[in-house]
Amino acid sequence: MAFAEITNANMFLITLLLLSLSSIPLSSSTITQDFVMCLVDNSDASFPMDSSFFTHDLNASSFKQALETSAQNLRYLMPSKPKPEFIFEPLYETHVQAAVVCAKKLRLHLRLRSGGHDYEGLSYVSEMETAFVIVDLSKLRQINVDLESNTAWVHAGASIGETLEQDGTRILYKWQQVADKLDENLFIRAIIQPASKTPKSKERTISVSYQGQFLGDAKRLLQVMQRSFPQLGLTKKDCLETSWIKSVMYIAGFPSTAPPEALLAGKSLFKNYFKAKSDYVEKPIPIEGLEGLWKKLLEEDSPLTIWNPYGGMMAKIPETETPFPHRSGTLFKIQWLTLWQDGKASEAKHMEWMRNMYSYMEKYVSKSPRSAYVNYRDLDLGMNGRGTDAREWGKKYFKGNFERLVKIKAKFDPENFFRHEQSIPTKFK
Ligand SMILES: Cc1cc2nc3c(=O)[nH]c(=O)nc-3n(C[C@H](O)[C@H](O)[C@H](O)COP(=O)(O)OP(=O)(O)OC[C@H]3O[C@@H](n4cnc5c(N)ncnc54)[C@H](O)[C@@H]3O)c2cc1C
């Protein structure tokens, strides 16, 4: 909305806003000032400066807090990583629209952040553009549920038994054969990591935990397990009957005493220096492949790998129906992770271990392309602007849908305004 059209009350608000802007040191805040002026011109909702804008010059500690609160990978918060000129936290949808209009007009490079979970920090760090700003959507948390149409409209900032060793390799081999074919109400994933030494085993060993969710009662689950996966040896005491929301909290790692309201805090339980990669598996990994993997895992300090079965509804949707292409024929997805505590000091060592392990696994996982899961963002696969053909990484995430995505991108964002190191390009190369 233009100045000429605003009411008296709004005029007062804008006067206040301009007064507070004048307290920002001029030298480093011109971009912020121009941006705010433009926002005022383009939105009819007010912008409370102290809760919407964060710049290092205005208030270093609240800027740091705004930058770090939802950022998940500490690797991308290190002092050597580029920092945004400012962070804008819109309070209304019209703020977001105005932010896009103004960033375009002022030629500012935008990074949009919803939950801040991007594995390679792409929502809060740009290494391809020198100056950038963050539009952080964490204050847009409305959720509207329409029971009649069975749909929900969720704003972008909204957040939402174990066996050890004992012939673990053979059981995991069996899991690979059955996990995607189990009863449709049953999901069992495998979580694999080195286990610390115990009085029984003096050496570090590999632990495989099976975490499951069954939509039904324990009695029926035991019948299903007896029929399809008796090797796991599930008993009644391994089962916990609970509400669906509590099961979500259990899988997310909350303590059993935490109330469901804990989910509303929007705070992650996981904040680490980490590197992740992913794979898809189409044929069970043979026993010798698993044994070689155990050796690799035991070389690293804190590796973790999570194997999620596909099948069920995932396999019923045709590969070309949505951008997500990993459908029928996929047995399970692997997430590879390595975590560390001392920042830059040991980063190179962990990155090297990860790349080495990934290369070892090549012959056991999907091929042509070796697919990957876009939510487990991995910049090793390739980046825009590095002279590589975007298809090299694009096909891993999206298979044959990548070319269609490029066409759509060229149609709706021909200037490539929304871009980052692995955004869909408007053309190849
Ligand atoms: C602890 C943890 C657990 C995870 N668990 C799972 C899991 O179980 N399953 C799974 O599939 N994934 C999981 N992930 C990965 C996660 O789903 C992805 O990283 C996802 O992209 C996170 O969304 P976000 O809004 O938090 O990301 P952000 O970091 O905010 O954004 C991710 C990317 O999308 C862009 N973006 C953000 N908002 C918008 C917007 N409104 N419009 C356009 N672009 C936007 C950003 O600029 C960035 O490029 C996990 C990640 C973490 C850190």
Image (cartoon, rainbow, N blue to C red):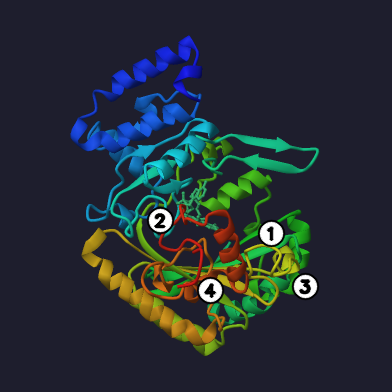
Dot 2 beta carbon under 8 Å from ligand 1 = yes
The numbered mark at residue 236 is: 1
Mark 1 and mark 4 in contact? Answer it, CB < 8 Å.
no
Q: Say which element carries label 1.
A: helix
Q: Nearer the viewer, residue 399 or 363?
A: 399
Which of disc 2 and disc 1 is earlier in sequence? Answer: 2
Q: Which residue is mark 3?
A: 227
- Is residue 55 rendered to the left or right of residue 378? left
Which of disc 3 and disc 2 is earlier in sequence? Answer: 2
Residue at the image point whose x is 48% and y is 84% from the top: 362
Q: Which residue is mark 2?
A: 122
Front disc: 1 or 2: 2
Which of disc 2 and disc 4 is earlier in sequence? Answer: 2
Q: Is residue 185 above or below residue 353?
A: above
Q: Say which element carries label 4.
A: helix
Q: Residues within 10 Å of mark 3 (few under 14, many from 20)?
A: few
Q: Callout 2, which amino acid?
A: Leu
Q: Position of residue 151 (x, y in %)?
A: 73, 43
For the view shown, which residue lies furthest in the right direction? 148
Q: Callout 3, which amino acid?
A: Arg
Mark 2 and mark 3 in contact? Answer it, CB < 8 Å.
no
Front disc: 1 or 3: 3
- Separation of marks 1 and 3 at Cα, in angstroms: 15 Å
Front disc: 2 or 3: 2
Which of disc 3 and disc 1 is earlier in sequence? Answer: 3
